[in-house]
Amino acid sequence: MKRILYSSLAIGGLVLLSGCNGKMGQFKSEYFNTNPNPLEVVGQTVPATVTGNIPAKFFKKNASVTITPVLVYGGQQTAATPVTYQGEKVRGNNPVVNFNNGGTVTIPVNYLYNPDMQKSELFLTFNVQQGNKQYVLPQVKVANGIIATAALADAGTVNPATAADKFQRVINDKYTADIRFLINQANIRKGELDSQGVVDLNETLRSAAAAPNQEIEEINISSYASPEGAYDFNQRLAENREKNTTAYLEGQLKKDKITEFGELTKQFTAEDWDGFQQLVAASNIQDKDLILSVLSNVKDPEVREKEIRNLAAVFETLADQILPQLRRSHITASINTIGKSDEELARLAQNDPKSLTVDELLYAATLTDDNNRKAQIYEQATRIYPNDFRGFNNLGKAQFINKDYASAIANLNKAARLAPNSSEVAMNQGLVQLVNKDFNGANRSFSNAAGLEGLGDALGVYYLTQGDNAAAVKAFGSSKSNNAALAQILTKNYAAAKNTLGAIANPDATTYYLTAILGARTNNASMVTTNLDKAIKLDNALANMALNDLEFANFNLGSIIK
């Protein structure tokens, strides 16, 4: 009986010692699961989680294991933050893995992405501290490659904001004069025809008729009677004033040999209550509020006049100050000034830019599709009109399109000093910051451009760089661009992405490459090969990219990439 008990204790002691003594066994790849696998770019980083299920009787009670995720690519490697787990006999604050039962370990992974990482492998390395001994266990592969589709977001393709010119080909101006009449009379007095207003109007009409860049679009005569007395009498009076004024004006136009004056329109108003109300409202007449109340509340003209006449003291003032101003014919001449033609503006911008106004010069830049020519014109604008921010902003835009980001930000900063509150400048500064990966700066700049039309595309790319693909889709709205389609692909809205890509006005290599990715994700082999072929013909560098792209791992690209 004693020998049996001794043997049992001995066996138990051996089991107990085996939990501490001896080295750790090798970790196996089947212990680990990586999510996602393959890895995937999100924004600017490659995040993942490796979960390990450690079997029973494996993790030594007196051991600490530091696990480091290492991404191996192109002859180099990058380590993520290590994590440490320990056995139950180790004094420390690390998570414990039980020897008898095993346990779960969680290893977070995050790398700042660069394109060299696309073809890569993720390994776990194991450094063991066991008592006074340190040793390394063989590394284990836990993931293969990175899907880098999100990295196709490109701030450099967003259209920067233009600070608009105010050029108008046709500038319309209105010139007016009044001919006043005595009470109950319609004859035009010589003194009225010699008034400065009538003299100036006639001179303006003569000048416009003679000028090669002006045209008289219309002349209008509106004649009025003041709103006192019988309505029928006032109607005849206003009509006669209109006839006499028309006869005078037609005679004057004939005398001045003005034959082109558009249309001569005319009308009369029997009782000018609207004019009466406006003059009273602008006056300092006593009880004017009471008069205005009568005008607002009493609709019948005869009752209205009677109510006002009952204000005897006030009516006398009205008769002296207000009513005489309503007995008139109002003449309005609408004259157009015709600006330089597009051909003239383009020629002068090339040969004599100083002869153009700033708005003409800025407009001239819109007449060419050559971005380098635009930049030249905007540069002229900054030299000739150095205090106008629009030249610097638009020059910065042209330089951004040419990918000269250093020059672009220099000119945009000048524009910002001239116009600190310009939304266009703020958006464009944000785009340069986004290209330069200054995401905090871009966020501030875009906030300062809030409400600007066209900001959505810039914000959409910003959200893509931050990994917020749903917010990117919302920001892009109905935009038809590669970046907008990318956001839809990343949120798995493949039908919307297909429509967006098909609606892009000027498809480029990226458009076709994204369409090929869409084909791969929807298992459409012909869509993959047809569009990859188009993409590679436009940009041969995409051939090597496609070979390493795990989006196409299940497709044979040999027919298009040789």
Image (cartoon, rainbow, N blue to C red):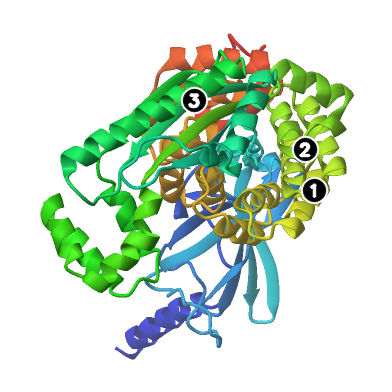
Q: Which residue is mark 1?
A: 411
**Mark 3 vs mark 2, CA separation in Å:** 57 Å
Distance (Cα) linking label 1 and label 3: 55 Å
Query: Is 307 displayed left or right of 529 in the figure?
Result: left
The residue under label 3 is 249
Residue at image position (56%, 28%) is: 335
Label 3 amino acid?
Answer: Leu
Q: Which image quarter holds the N terminus?
A: bottom left
In percent of width and height, residue 262 lies at 49, 18
Q: Residue furthest bottom?
A: 2
Closer-to-camera residue (20/253): 253
Of 519 and 5, the residue lying toward us: 519
Q: Secondary structure at mark 3?
A: helix
Q: Which residue is mark 2?
A: 399
Between residue 411 and residue 8, name the one nearer to us: 411
User: Badge 3: few (under 14), some or many (20 or more) residues near its Cα, within 10 Å?
Assistant: some
Q: Amino acid at mark 1?
A: Asn
Circle 3 or circle 2, nearest the eye: 3
| Residue 240 visible in rendering | yes
